[in-house]
Amino acid sequence: KPSIVWFRDDLRATDNPALRAAADDGAAVALYVFDEESPGIRPLGAASCWWLHHSLLALREDLAALGVPLLLRRGPAAEIVRETATAMGSGSLYWNRRYGEAERMLDAGIKAWARESGMHAESFQASLLHEPWAVTTKQGGPFKVFTPFWRTVSEMDFREPLEAPEPGRGFSGRLPGSEELDTWGLLPRNPDWSAGLSESWQPGSAQAHELLDDFVEHGLADYSVNRDCPDLPGSSRLSPFLRWGQLSPFEVWHAQQGRRRELGDGAAAFASELGWREFCWHQYFHRPDLATANLRPGFDHYPWAWPGGQGGAAQGAGSHEAAASSAETQSAATLLRAWQEGRTGFPLVDAGQRQLWHTGWMHNRVRMVSASLLVKNLGIHWQVGEQWFWDTLVDADPASNPANWQWVAGSGADASPFFRIFNPETQAAKFDPHGSYVGQWIPELTMADYPEPVVDLKVSRREALDAYSSLPR
Ligand code: FAD
């Protein structure tokens, strides 16, 4: 009987416990479901859709080399998984766990159905080093502060990565229909804005492993210094591969651990960034509303300039074209567009936003500076920025993106204090002192048509601090 391995955020053949289990049964079939319909599932942003398309092509090849066919289906996952398993007369169903609330409920429902139908259904830990429910404070609750969280987690043992299954363990009988990837419309057309993404990335496990090896060999030693310099290839650029599971965190962890003794600081700093990834996912597990609610409720009263009114940003946050009702929101909408398009007149921020638009990725330091400008100087709700990043980042994930936005805004767990307002000019002087990064992204920088700053940093900073001081504690 065929065993189905249902791929989700784990698009790899190596260190994939669900795939291994299906292959061990002897007749594995892989299934990917493009699901935009199930309740509570956040539809992918445009850059993520591009990444997914290319990743599925790469996964199909990787699996074909093992003799495992990949079925592609679009629709509500519960229905499609049930339909496929029934049509194939499958004996078992395997997947690696997801941590969003809607996803977990959906998976639990399918598991219950499979078991009632006499099918073996099993899920595995593959995307996080530790399960969110297994890491708790002494009092038994989730950690709210990163340092003790990471101290606790990094002292735990992580399993070794698994090899890909032996070839020849795939199902070779008759398969139900699979859809053509091209019909899913994941790639942009009219206009096709993806040339910069194609120049920058080759989604798939092969490039992920190459990048990892290269980074561990050449980048890790100086990571703790170079990671902050946006003009250098100082960080690993593994984020989209980790997001889509083309590498597992266990593979990345053990790769750095192999050089830990020799490299000390660089490896430890890098390892702790993997820790931030875990911390974000654990927060998301405990707070499924991470992208839509301030973790610190006092921020519900912050007087955002956009969208108008206080509280959440649900209305208008995604609709950049929304009709502005007053002159004030009109100008906030104009400011938002200037920020999105990299025309704020602050070169570091504009370079970052253009890097994001062109490549689907932005350097971490620049993400912090750019987000700070949007939220604290332009007074635009962090959720509006979060949605823009969600749409444009190839590494956008439902945990790290909102958690980092809440960190910058000051509304999150273990957040940067609100009064820490990044000054884009001093940040540029410190981290891009020769202007190589801004020069790369803003060719017109020294010309007359580069815009004047859209906001007075000092005045807007003072206004933000005043607004903050009026919030209820
Ligand atoms: P490296 O420095 O090489 O770090 C290694 C890995 O650690 C990364 O690939 C990533 O998986 C993880 N990591 C590093 N920093 C963080 C962090 N602060 N939070 C969580 N994980 C981290 N990261 C995402 O993966 N997805 C997002 O949607 C995302 N949105 C962000 C939004 C804002 C406003 C900010 C300030 C940061 C965001 N980050 C996000 C975190 C960080 O900027 C990226 O993970 C990092 O820039 C990716 O580059 P890298 O792979 O070279 O990182």
Image (cartoon, rainbow, N blue to C red):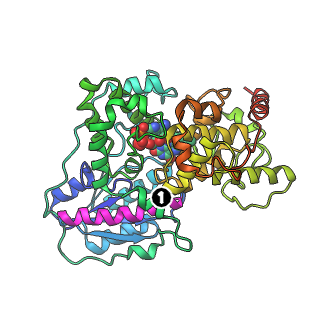
Q: Is residue 173 above or below residue 378?
A: below
Is residue 187 located in the magenta-colored stretch of the structure? no
Q: Nearest the camera: 432 or 352?
A: 432
> For residue 136, which quarter of the picture?
top left
Q: Which residue is mark 1?
A: 48
Residue at x 75% of width, y 33% of height: 464
Q: Residue furthest right?
A: 327
Would residue 280 be visible to someone looking at this image?
A: no
Mark 1: C-beta under 8 Å from nearest atom of ligand 1: no
| Residue 365 at x, y percent in the picture | 53, 36
Q: Give the quadrant of residue 302.
A: top right
Residue 368 located left or right of residue 240: right
**Vertical position of residue 175 compared to residue 442: above or below:** below
The answer to whether residue 225 is left or right of residue 36 is left
**Mark 1 Cα shell of 10 Å, populated few (<14), some (14-19), many (≥20):** many
Query: Which part of the image, by quadrant, shows the C terminus?
Result: top right
Where is residue 161 shown, x and y percent of the image? 23, 42
The residue stretch that appears in magenta: 43-66
Magenta stretch encompasses residue 58: yes
Compared across the picture, whether 126 is left or right of 376 comes to left
Q: Position of residue 191 (x, y in %)?
A: 56, 71
Dividing the picture into quadrants, the one containing residue 199 is bottom left
Type of amino acid under label 1:
Ser
Residue at the image position 24 percent from the left and 23 percent from the top:
261
Which is more toward the observer, 261 or 17? 261
Q: Secondary structure at mark 1?
A: helix
Can residue 338 be seen in this snapshot? Answer: yes
Which secondary structure class fits the magenta region best? Answer: helix
The quarter of the picture where the N terminus appears is bottom left
Q: Is residue 393 above or below residue 372?
A: below
| Whole-percent x, y for residue 436 in the image | 51, 41
